[in-house]
């Protein structure tokens, strides 16, 4: 039976990406599932794989068709998490596709991959 696995992000620097995503999402790196071109990150509670990191030389897409949405429950939590993620190495993206009164903030990981921090208290279904 076919089933969905987990998202995989292409990165140029696997150790840097692993450091960022493990700190950002409270994940752990699985040493027996790593190589110079691959790293599996799992949930810290032991519930299984959460994210794959794959070495990539292709350029980052400025408007990726597929990206990660990270959820928070309030505007205050969104502001706090955006600040924390920037402190970990993320950067704000000058996003030219924001709708009026967006419920999401677009950031880039240290490799430049875009992701969103979505405030669920303000979110509309499929808003970004």
Image (cartoon, grey):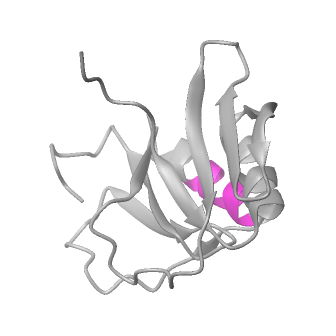
Q: Is residue 27 above or below residue 59?
A: above
Asked whether, in this view, residue 47 is left or right of residue 99, the answer is: right
28 vs 55, nearest the viewer: 55
Asked whether residue 27 is in view, the answer is yes
Q: Quadrant of residue 127?
A: bottom left
Q: Residue furthest left?
A: 125
Residue found 51% across the figure and 85% down from its top: 59
Quick one: quadrant of the N terminus? Answer: top left
Q: What residue is shown at x 27% (from left), y 67% (from top)? A: 65
Name which quarter of the figure residue 4 lies in: top left
Task: State the residue in front, 4 or 22.
Answer: 4
**Of residues 108 and 55, which is closer to you in this image?**
55
Q: Please identify the dominant SS of the magenta region.
A: helix
**Where residue 22 appears, x then y in whole percent?**
74, 42
Residue visible at 25% across and 66% down? 101
Q: Measured from the top left, where is residue 57 in percent x and y?
A: 59, 80
Q: Nearer the viewer, residue 34 or 120?
A: 34
Image location (x, y in percent) of residue 47: 60, 12
Q: Position of residue 118 (x, y in %)?
A: 39, 49
Region in magenta:
79-86
Task: Using the rendered image of the protein, determine whether residue 30 is visible from the camera's viewpoint.
Answer: no
Is 7 magenta? The answer is no
Image quadrant where residue 92 sits: bottom right
Q: Quadrant of the C terminus?
A: bottom left
Asked if residue 83 is among those painted magenta in the image, a careful observer would answer yes
As displayed, is residue 88 above or below residue 112?
above
The number of numbered discs placed on residues in the rendered structure image is 0
In the displayed structure, 82 sits above or below 57; it is: above
Residue at (76%, 69%) from the top-left corner? Answer: 13
């Amino acid at each position: 039976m076919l089933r969905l696995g987990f998202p995989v992000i292409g990165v140029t620097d696997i150790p840097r990406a692993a450091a960022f995503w493990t700190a950002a999402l409270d994940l752990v790196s699985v040493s027996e599932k790593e190589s110079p071109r691959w790293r599996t990150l799992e949930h810290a509670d032991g519930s299984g794989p959460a994210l794959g990191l794959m070495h990539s030389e292709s350029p980052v897409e400025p408007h990726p068709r597929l990206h990660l949405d990270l959820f928070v429950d309030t505007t205050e939590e969104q502001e706090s998490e955006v600040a924390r993620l920037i402190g970990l190495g993320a950067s704000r993206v000058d996003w030219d596709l924001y709708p009026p009164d967006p419920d999401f903030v677009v950031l880039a990981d240290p490799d430049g991959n875009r992701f969103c921090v979505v405030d669920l208290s303000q979110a509309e279904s499929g808003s970004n």
